[in-house]
Amino acid sequence: MTPATARLFCSCALLFTAGAATAQGLYRNVDANGRVTYTDRPPAANAQPAPVGRSDGGAGASAQLPFELRQIVQRYPVTLYTGDDCAPCTAGRQLLQTRGIPFDERTVKSSEEIAALERLSGRNGLPLLTIGAQQLKGFSDTEWSQYLNAAGYPKSVQLPPGYRNPPPQPLVAQQAVPAAPAPAPAAAPRPSVGPATDAPTPSNPAGIRF
């Protein structure tokens, strides 16, 4: 295990939402910047209705999805952040796959990616699930299902036959290694010059060297 991955830990304890919150359900709130979050507290009486989400893309090839599911993916795209040797990450992935949730997966391995995860969520624990702007830190079957339900995702698979989520991608895009510069062309060989002689010749009877 490298020093970078040693700093990354998995949230192995399952988190359970309090019974009262589960019974009351979740409320969708939208702040002034359009960020959508869910809470167990009802919105204020003067709260404005939540606007329709932005169509900024979602997980996988959303154009292949049924219309209603595609709308949900566009409003609340799901992204799963995982690491190596992380049992809760595997359990979270299996939950999404079992329900047929379209999602993107980002892997966290290098020191640079761990730093990016900390900037994103304020911690370096995995797994991390985002549903739209909502972050769920650590795996909990109950909590994840509750938020997926609140976002409108179906409880059973509604994916078309042959649909595949995109393969996992590193959280920080790998930069291409610059190509090595081409070697300089070899210099043309210089013509050899015979040894100079001071002996007189018919064209240089005095034997003068130039």
Image (cartoon, helix red, strand yellow):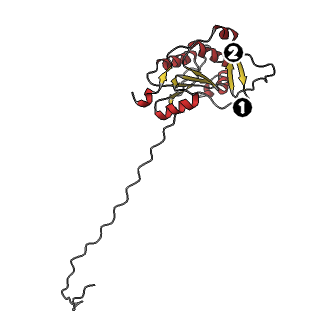
Residue 170 sits above or below residue 150 on the image? below
State the image coordinates of residue 109 (x, y, percent, origin top left).
46, 30
- Mark 2 or mark 1: name the one nearer the start of the chain: 1
Above or below, comparing residue 103 to residue 204 in the picture = above
Give the residue pinned by disc 1.
33
Q: Residue at x 41, y 50 (%)?
A: 180
Is residue 1 visible to the viewer in this orientation of the structure?
A: yes
Amino acid on which the number 2 mark rests in the picture: Asp
- Locate residue 186, reporting x and y percent: 34, 61
Looking at this view, name the residue that lies furthest to the right.
46
User: Which of 85/39 is in front?
Assistant: 39
Q: Secondary structure at mark 2?
A: loop
Place of residue 105 in the rendered image (x, y in percent of width and height, measured from the top left): 53, 26
Q: Secondary structure at mark 1?
A: loop
Cα distance, mark 2 to mark 1?
21 Å
Residue sitting nearer the eye, 127 or 18: 18
Task: Check the picture and name the quadrant holding the N terminus.
Answer: top left
Q: On the rendered structure, is 97 left or right of 27?
A: left
Mark 1, other Cα within 10 Å: few <14 / some 14–19 / many ≥20: few
Residue for point 57% across, 23% down? 129
Relative horizontal placement of residue 179, taking residue 99 as reference (left or right):
left
| Residue assigned mark 2 | 40
Q: Residue shown at 66%/27% (left/top)?
A: 74
- The amino acid type found where label 1 is placed reads Asn
Q: Is residue 170 visible?
A: no
Label pair 2/1, CB-CB below 8 angstroms: no
